[in-house]
Amino acid sequence: MSILQIVKYGNPILTAKAEEIKNLDEYIEELAQNMVQTMYAAPGLGLAAPQVNESKRLMTIDLSVGENSQNLIILINPELISQEGESISEEGCLSVPDINEKVVRPSRIIVRGIDLKGNEKTIEAEGLLARVFCHEIDHINGKLFIDRLSSLKKSLIKKKLKKWIQMGKI
Ligand SMILES: [Zn+2]
């Protein structure tokens, strides 16, 4: 297993819609395990494949960040099938360093996808878990959390990020 490099803001893979996974082969298995290790090392609560430069609909989540292996979720081709309520809380992203902003997300969701064995999974989530699912599903659709902010806030942050890129900070 290896720790992968996390792609940062400015890389076009982060704004592209990721491809559906059609074959659950060894490559996907290894990618998923490497993503888990990368997520734990970062550390982060979730990771989507485009963040490790793979345009694939695959994500990993573990709210315990490796403390409790039962919390680990690896989901392939995830789909948000229902959502309700509204919750506002601060979010950050491993691909958008040093930016934390309040983002509106649904408070409860149902997600469907498949696991590494090819079994269909339907997961109900609320609160922080729902938030992380929405954040990672956004990633595989080419969307970042800053895209969910007001256009004024978004343009200010983009300016800041552009400056950081020029300074070599990102
Ligand atoms: Zn993120």
Image (cartoon, helix red, strand yellow):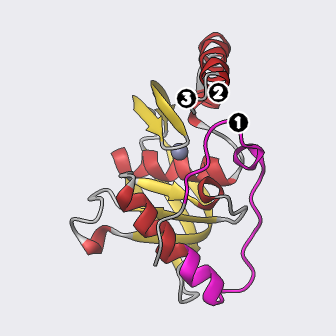
Nearest to the eye among marks 1 and 3: give it.
3
Q: For mark 2, what is the residue? A: 165
Amino acid, disc 1: Gly
Residues at circles 2 and 3 in contact by the CB criterion of under 8 Å: yes
How many residues crowd mark 3 within 10 Å: few (<14), some (14–19), many (20+)? Answer: few
Residue drawn at x 71%, y 50% is 141
Q: Earlier in the sequence, mark 1 or mark 2?
A: 1
User: Is residue 73 visible to the viewer in this orientation of the structure?
Assistant: yes
Marks 2 and 3, how far apart at CA: 6 Å
The local secondary structure at tag 2 comes to helix
Asked if residue 37 lies in the magenta stretch, the reply is no
Instruction: Tell whether 13 sits left or right of 28.
Output: right
Q: For mark 3, what is the residue? A: 169
Residue 157 placement: quadrant: top right
Residue drawn at x 45%, y 62% is 38
**Highlighted range, magenta:** 5-31
Q: Earlier in the sequence, mark 1 or mark 3?
A: 1
> Which quadrant of the rendered structure holds the C terminus?
top right
Expressed as whole percent of the image width and height from the top left, the position of residue 25 reads 66, 89
CB of residue at label 3: within 8 Å of ligand 1?
no
Expressed as whole percent of the image width and height from the top left, the position of residue 71 reads 30, 68
Residues at circles 1 and 2 in contact by the CB criterion of under 8 Å: yes
Front in this rendered view, residue 31 or 128: 31
- Residue found at the far left of this picture: 67
Marks 1 and 3, how far apart at CA: 12 Å
Amino acid, disc 3: Lys
Q: Which mark is residue 10?
A: 1
Front in this rendered view, residue 125 or 148: 148
Instruction: Indicate whether 102 appears above or below 9.
Output: above
Instruction: Indicate whether 109 appears above or below 103.
Output: below
